[in-house]
């Protein structure tokens, strides 16, 4: 009988060791975090929408300038691609933040630990997406610099 | 019969309090790595902006610039960019260190600090985001009206 209860006790102790109760002061802090995350999500959605409007306006202007350049439509397509990459990233970050805030609020309201697990998952996804956006931005910046050097070399005979 | 009794027992404890499980903590190393990366990138970018700022001020002092108003505006923008990048870089590195401590020692105080650092980050990022959207609205309106 004792042999049977011993491993069971150990198991319960192990569970208690792995799951830590959330500090009492953290409830209010998490509530505020959820509110700010929701604000940040909304501003990200607004930013994505404004970038979309800006894309159409800028492309309309650039279209007029590039029509005399050989292969100008290719550069417009490139610009659309760059805009769409950043718009997608902004919207995706907003989406992750929205879910993060929702999970956090739900976890606090119903005191549901599973929801808190998911909140930590979406917090990770948010930082991961932000990181990939930075990496993509860096790659695009290098590509734009190379394109600029190429265009300057190509256009230099016509500059004077 | 035994099953019914068990169910009654479970519903009796409606609000058991929140726990940080092993599943939740399994995401912490990933979050820590990405915050570390973003923090380092932020500080490196701030370093580059700072370098450009120093060169800009040096050139401005050595040569007599006719349009001083424009120069001051550009310098102020660079100072602002430097402060934002350095601030966010430092904040993200701080978050990264808090996550590392919370994950390593699993102490209540460390977890509280981690939670607090994340709240501070979202608060500052939220304020900046509101300002950025306002700036974007104005610039888009100017662009459309131009």
Image (tube, coloured by chain):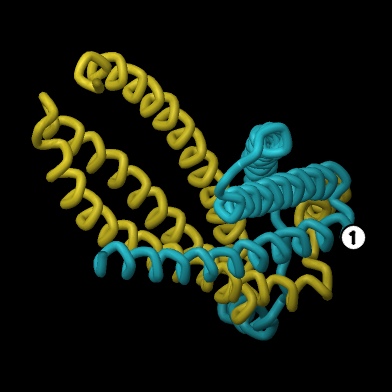
Chain colours: A yellow, B cyan
Relative depth, front residue between A102 and B132: B132
* Left-right relation of A53 to B56: left
Q: Quadrant of residue B38?
A: top right
* Left-right relation of B9 to B3: right
Relative depth, front residue between B12 and A40: A40
The spot of residue B6 in percent (x, y) is: 63, 76
Q: In the image, what residue occupies the spot 90% across and 60% down?
A: B109
> Disc 1 marks which residue?
B109
Q: In the image, what residue occupies the spot 60% across and 48% down?
A: B71
Q: In the image, what residue occupies the spot 83% across and 59% down?
A: B113
* Helix, strand or loop for disc 1: helix
Can the viewer see residue B33? no
Relative depth, front residue between A13 and B100: B100
Crowd band around label 1 with a 10 angstrom C-alpha radius: few (<14), some (14–19), many (20+): few
Report the number of discs. 1
The spot of residue A79 in percent (x, y) is: 25, 39
Q: Chain of mark 1?
A: B
The spot of residue B126 in percent (x, y) is: 59, 67
Name the quadrant of the C terminus of chain A: top left
Relative depth, front residue between B56 and A83: B56
Q: In the image, what residue occupies the spot 75% across and 62% down?
A: B115
* Left-right relation of A83 to B80: left
Question: Does A107 appear above or below A12?
Answer: below
Can the viewer see residue A133? yes
The spot of residue A107 in percent (x, y) is: 60, 72
């Amino acid at each position: 009988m004792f042999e049977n209860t011993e491993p069971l006790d150990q198991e319960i102790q192990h569970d208690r060791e792995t799951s830590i109760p959330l500090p009492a002061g953290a409830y209010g802090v998490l509530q505020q975090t959820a509110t700010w995350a929701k604000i940040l999500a909304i501003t990200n959605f607004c930013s994505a929408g404004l970038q979309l409007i800006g894309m159409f306006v800028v492309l309309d202007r650039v279209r007029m300038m590039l029509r005399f350049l050989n292969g100008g439509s290719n550069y417009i397509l490139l610009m659309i691609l760059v805009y769409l990459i950043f718009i997608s990233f902004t919207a995706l970050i907003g989406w992750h933040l929205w879910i993060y805030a929702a999970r956090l609020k739900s976890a606090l309201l119903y005191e549901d630990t599973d929801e808190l697990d998911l909140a930590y998952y979406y917090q990770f996804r948010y930082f991961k997406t932000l990181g990939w956006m930075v990496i993509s931005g860096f790659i695009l910046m290098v590509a734009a610099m190379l394109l600029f050097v190429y265009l300057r070399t190509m256009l230099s005979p016509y500059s004077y | 019969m035994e099953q019914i009794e068990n169910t009654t027992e479970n519903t009796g404890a409606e609000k058991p309090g929140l726990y940080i499980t092993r599943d939740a903590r399994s995401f912490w190393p990933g979050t820590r790595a990405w915050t570390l990366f973003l923090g380092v990138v932020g500080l490196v970018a701030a370093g580059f902006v700072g370098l450009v700022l120093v060169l800009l001020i040096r050139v401005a002092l050595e040569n007599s610039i006719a349009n001083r108003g424009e120069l001051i505006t550009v310098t102020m923008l660079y100072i602002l960019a430097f402060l934002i990048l350095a601030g966010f870089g430092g904040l993200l590195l701080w978050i990264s260190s808090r996550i590392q401590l919370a994950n390593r020692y699993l102490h209540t105080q460390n977890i509280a600090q981690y939670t607090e650092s994340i709240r501070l980050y979202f608060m500052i990022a939220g304020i900046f985001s509101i300002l950025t959207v306002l700036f974007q609205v104005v610039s888009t309106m100017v662009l459309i009206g131009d």
